[in-house]
Image (cartoon, rainbow, N blue to C red):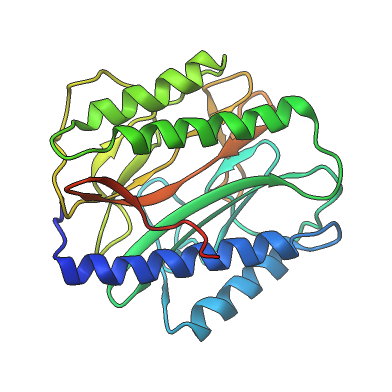
Amino acid sequence: MIEILSPSEIARARETGALVAHILQTVRSRAAVGVNLLEIDAWTKEMIRDAGAVSCYVDYAPSFGRGPFGHYICTSVNDAVLHGRPFDYTLVDGDLLSLDLAVSLGGVVADSAISFHVGERRPPAEVALIEATERALAAGIAAAKPDARVGDISHAIGTVLSGAGYPVNTEFGGHGVGTTMHQDPHISNTGEPGRGYRLRPGLLLALEPWVMADTDELVFDADGWTLRSATGCQTAHSEHTVAITEDGAEILTLPRS
């Protein structure tokens, strides 16, 4: 299903996006050495509840997961890159933490992800990994214009990631959002320009470049959800929800000052 949202729904999406950005930045500011992933999940639950919003994750049970996710935020650490299910793990200095959050507010969803280091240790190769996903995200957003094709976004993202020397996995990527979290069109993190669905105003897209340092192969963790790099290498993930407008892509999940 591909939804084209009305102006009033886009206005509600802006509020959802602002909430998602606020929660992610709040968690980032509190995610220090000694913090447990289950604490992060509890903070997120409280902030979603206090905002009158609804978690998109707690009851989420797609075909690729093992039963309902059962938590409020994805917390992927080091070699974990996607769908990291919070568990009893205490963060240490230098952990590379990715947070992925989707909530619904006023019946409209926004989805975003950030990656950063906990503590003081920031290995340059890992900083470069994070920065590559951020540059790729910016390139994808720049390509998301009315009458452009999904393939134009995929090509822009993939050009940055491959140009930085990283293998690109195509099993998971960006997607449409709207009244539900995961919708068509699928947006691969590499592709051919000029191909795929034509973008038009009112379309909401979650663009999410993610990479693993030296492989494109994923393995499932024992929890049935967390996806890790097959080689144990470090990973990173960046994501924004954007609205296609007459003038281009409006980023809905940027932190507000």
Corner quadrant of residue 88: bottom right
Give the side of residue 149 with respect to residue 124, left or right: left
Image coordinates of residue 175 in percent, x first then y, are 31, 44
Corner quadrant of residue 53: bottom left
Q: Nearer the viewer, residue 203 or 91?
A: 203
Image coordinates of residue 123 in percent, x first then y, are 80, 31
Image coordinates of residue 156 in percent, x first then y, are 36, 24
Quick check: can you spot residue 72?
no
Image coordinates of residue 157 in percent, x first then y, are 40, 27
Q: How many marks?
A: 0
| Residue in view at x 40 percent, y 63 percent | 17
Quadrant of the drawing holding the C terminus = bottom right
Quick check: can you spot residue 113?
yes
Q: Nearer the viewer, residue 217 or 75?
A: 75
Residue 255 position (above or below residue 139) = below
Corner quadrant of residue 166: top right
Residue 121 position (above or below residue 23) = above
Residue 132 position (above or below residue 83) = above
| Residue in view at x 34 percent, y 35 percent | 142
Give the side of residue 7 with respect to residue 238, left or right: left
| Residue in view at x 59 percent, y 71 percent | 44
| Residue in view at x 62 percent, y 18 percent | 214
Q: Nearer the viewer, residue 36 or 145?
A: 145
